[in-house]
């Protein structure tokens, strides 16, 4: 195939991925909507009577016995469960279409396919869905499916509508093997942090009463694990970016807006992990901190690239 044909095929795969993600979202939403609602409040300890050997004869004292740690799962109807299973299959097919779009784009331009805003967003959507599906292979996180799919579908839709750039060469500063190192790490970390951000938003949305949403403890656990994996990758991306800057511009750090907001994002997530590990932060306070970090990540991706000039302004946004 010619480069033009490969580029057109990549565009078609992006459209196919959007549709598949939308259908998958609908299936996950059906499973979630028709599941059994459950309470978000923790069960209170049950007081039982147990004889004791010390003290007056026949003396008894209450023994606090906690209920089983396992949460009561959402049990969907058979039809809703089938919808969720189909949704998961569609998510995998959409993931394959997303990957095919990236692969064909790379073959069309004969370089790593994340040299502009359009390619970067397509890759981040792929990374976010990969994080969700990879987590699903080990833990049952289908309750996040509807929300991750809507983020991926909207992201790809925005990439096509607002950020689309014709396949072609990149600016000289990006024509380096460092793009495969620095940007790849940033993409994978951004995908994981997107998964954590979705879980964090749902945590704040969930009330204490009956709800279709999963328990807050489950949402917080998913977010924390995603950030634990993402933070070292983001750290590596920042360091690799500094090394690339020295190679391209002769300095490691120049207070460029992209560099500043990448560092701010790193600081916020570092504060989140530090507070969790040392001060034992959990619940709403910890979730708000990680969502502040996610907001910084989004601004670093969108705001800096589009609204703020700098050496990293490679958005190439088409109106």
Image (cartoon, helix red, strand yellow):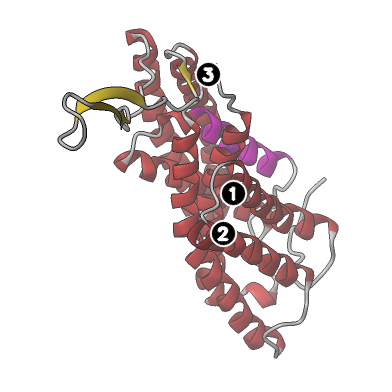
Quadrant in which the C terminus is drawn: top right
Where residue 119 appears, x then y in whole percent? 61, 54
Q: Position of residue 217 (x, y in %)?
A: 46, 37
The crowding category of the residue bearing disc 3, from other C-alpha atoms within 10 Å (few below 14, some 14 to 19, many at least 20), is some
Camera-near label (2 vs 3) is 2
Seen from this angle, which residue lies furthest bottom? 250
Residue displayed at 62% across by 34% down: 204
Residue placed under numbered mark 1 in the picture: 286
Give the mark, 2 or 1, whose residue is nearer the N terminus.
Answer: 2
Q: Is residue 304 left or right of residue 7?
A: right
Marker disc for residue 211 = 3
Q: Which mark is residue 275?
A: 2
Residue under the image location 67 percent in, 59 percent down: 116
From the viewer's side, name the closer residue of 199 and 207.
Answer: 207
* Residue 14 versus residue 231 in the image, above or below: above
Mark positioned earlier in the residue sequence (2 or 3): 3
Give x and y (percent) for residue 235.
54, 70
Q: Position of residue 273 (x, y in %)?
A: 53, 60
Is 151 included in the stretch rendered in magenta?
Answer: yes
The magenta region covers: 146-161
Residue visible at 53% across and 47% down in the picture? 282
Residue 174 vs 160, above or below: the answer is below
> With respect to residue 273, does 193 lie above or below?
above
Q: Is residue 120 magenta?
A: no
Binning the other alpha carbons within 10 Å of mark 1 as few (below 14), some (14 to 19) or many (20 upward) gives: some
Circle 3 SS class:
strand
Earlier-in-chain disc, 3 versus 1: 3
């Amino acid at each position: 195939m010619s480069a033009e044909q490969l580029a057109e095929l990549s565009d078609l795969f992006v459209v196919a991925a959007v549709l598949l993600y939308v259908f998958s979202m609908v299936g996950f939403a059906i499973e979630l909507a028709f599941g059994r609602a459950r309470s978000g409040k923790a069960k209170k300890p049950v007081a039982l009577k147990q004889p004791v050997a010390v003290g007056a004869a026949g003396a008894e004292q209450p023994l606090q016995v906690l209920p089983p740690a396992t949460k009561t799962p959402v049990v969907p109807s058979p039809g809703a469960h089938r919808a969720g299973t189909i949704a998961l299959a569609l998510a995998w097919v959409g993931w394959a279409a997303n990957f095919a779009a990236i692969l064909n784009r790379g073959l069309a331009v004969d370089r790593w396919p994340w040299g502009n805003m359009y390619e970067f967003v397509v890759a981040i959507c792929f990374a976010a869905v990969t994080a969700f599906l990879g987590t699903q292979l080990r833990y049952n996180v289908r309750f996040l499916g509807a929300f991750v799919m809507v983020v991926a579908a909207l992201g790809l839709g925005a990439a096509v509508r607002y950020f689309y750039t014709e396949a072609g060469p990149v600016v000289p500063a990006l024509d380096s093997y460092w793009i495969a190192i620095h940007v790849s790490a940033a993409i994978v970390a951004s995908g994981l942090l997107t998964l954590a951000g979705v879980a964090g938003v749902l945590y704040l949305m969930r009330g204490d009463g009956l709800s279709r949403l999963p328990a807050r403890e489950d949402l917080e656990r998913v977010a924390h694990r995603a950030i634990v994996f993402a933070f070292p990758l983001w750290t590596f991306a920042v360091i690799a970016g500094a090394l690339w800057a020295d190679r391209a511009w002769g300095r490691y750090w120049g207070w460029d807006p992209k560099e500043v907001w990448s560092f701010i994002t790193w600081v916020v997530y570092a504060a989140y992990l530090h507070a969790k590990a040392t001060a034992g932060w959990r619940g709403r306070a910890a979730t708000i901190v990680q969502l502040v970090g996610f907001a910084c990540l989004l601004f670093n991706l969108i705001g800096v690239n589009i609204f703020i000039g700098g050496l990293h302004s490679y958005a190439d946004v088409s109106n």
